[in-house]
Image (cartoon, coloured by chain):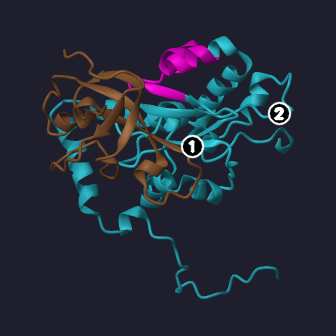
Chain colours: A cyan, B brown
Amino acid sequence: MSHDHDHDHHQPHPYQPDIEDKPFSERMVMTQAIAELIVEKGIVSADELRQQIELMDSREPGLGAKLVARTWVDPDFKARVLADVNKASAELGIDTGDIPIMAIENTEDVHNVVVCTLCSCYPRMLIGLPPDWYKSRAYRSRTVREPRKVLEEFGTTIPDDVEVRVHDSTADLRYIVLPARPAGTEGWSEDKLAELITRDSMIGVSLAKSPNTI
Amino acid sequence: MSTKKFNPGDSVRVREAYPPGHVRTPYFVRGCNGQIQQFVGSFANPEELAYGRDGKPEMQLYRVTFKQSDVWQGYQGPAADTLVIDIYEHWLEPIS
């Protein structure tokens, strides 16, 4: 017999607690209360609220990767991205909403990395919801103060003759890093190039993947 | 609508003020000297919006570059490393 089914069914298996099993924090209660109130007062309908959540969940780094890949093959498009990301994204059919997004380009001389020290501002419409570490106090406080050390921990070593430029997204802009196109990708299609462009490379904690990894 | 006070390249100092409430200028950069990198545009004042007010008049927003070594004493890294922060005009003072 490969599996013994005669074990004692009165002993429950250990299980992972559901979210509902944990106590509600004050902020969770407040979020729930505000959501119910704005629906009750008719400011937005429950369906509009759901649609907005669905829209945010539909956003993912592939959208940003598509944008960056196009900048790698089309210098005129890159110029338009650097001038106005929201407008240039619309050319690719990507709706980036009303919040202005700014693109910052990695070059031979400058490596850019993005942080929001005050909260967790992030170009969600282009690369989806931020990872938990982006919102952590450690990332937010250390990236402005010891960026090279933080980058090292992500496995990214920036040579001393390259400037590390940290962007603190404190106000009304969101930032997306345009990673540099790796050597050895000459003649690649946009779709194939996009596979090299990861979420982390658009935050600036890593570089684009090297061509021999895919 | 007010006209903008600074141009790219201007040297500025972040006001060393500690008002209570919702403030968008990070604590660590107050009192630091930097340089205007870019004028971004005017936006409803988030320090007013936070209290349900209309945020008018709109505030001018700049991207300001700081040398890391001017912000952090004993910064561990090359002198060329910089920090760029979005700062509203009422937080900036000209320095000659």
Classify A11 as above or below B9: below
In the foreground, B21 or A194: B21
Question: Which chain is mark 1 on?
Answer: B
In the foreground, B57 or A96: B57
Relative image position of residue A147 (x, y in whole percent): 55, 53
Q: Is residue A168 magenta?
A: no
Mark drawn on residue A183: 2
Q: Quadrant of the C terminus of chain A?
A: top right
- Quadrant of res A161: top right
- Quadrant of res B60: top left
User: Pointers 1 and 2 in contact (CB under 8 A)?
Assistant: no
Question: Which chain is mark 2 on?
Answer: A
Q: Secondary structure at mark 2?
A: loop
Give me the C-alpha separation between circle 1 and circle 2: 26 Å
Classify A158 as above or below B88: below
Classify B55 as above or below B75: above
- Quadrant of res A49: top left
Q: Is residue A92 magenta?
A: yes
Residue plotted at (56% across, 19% down): A81
In the foreground, B69 or B90: B69
Relative image position of residue A22 (x, y in whole percent): 36, 68
Relative image position of residue B66 (x, y in whole percent): 43, 41
Residue plotted at (41% across, 46% down): A120
Q: Which residues are magenta?
A: A78-103
Mark drawn on residue A82: none
Kindly tell me whether residue A68 is visible in this rendering.
yes
Residue plotted at (20% across, 38% down): B47
Left/right of residue A1 with respect to residue B65 in the rendered view = right
Q: Secondary structure at mark 1?
A: loop
Foreground mark, 1 or 2, reads 1
Identify residue type, mark 2: Ala
Mark drawn on residue B80: 1
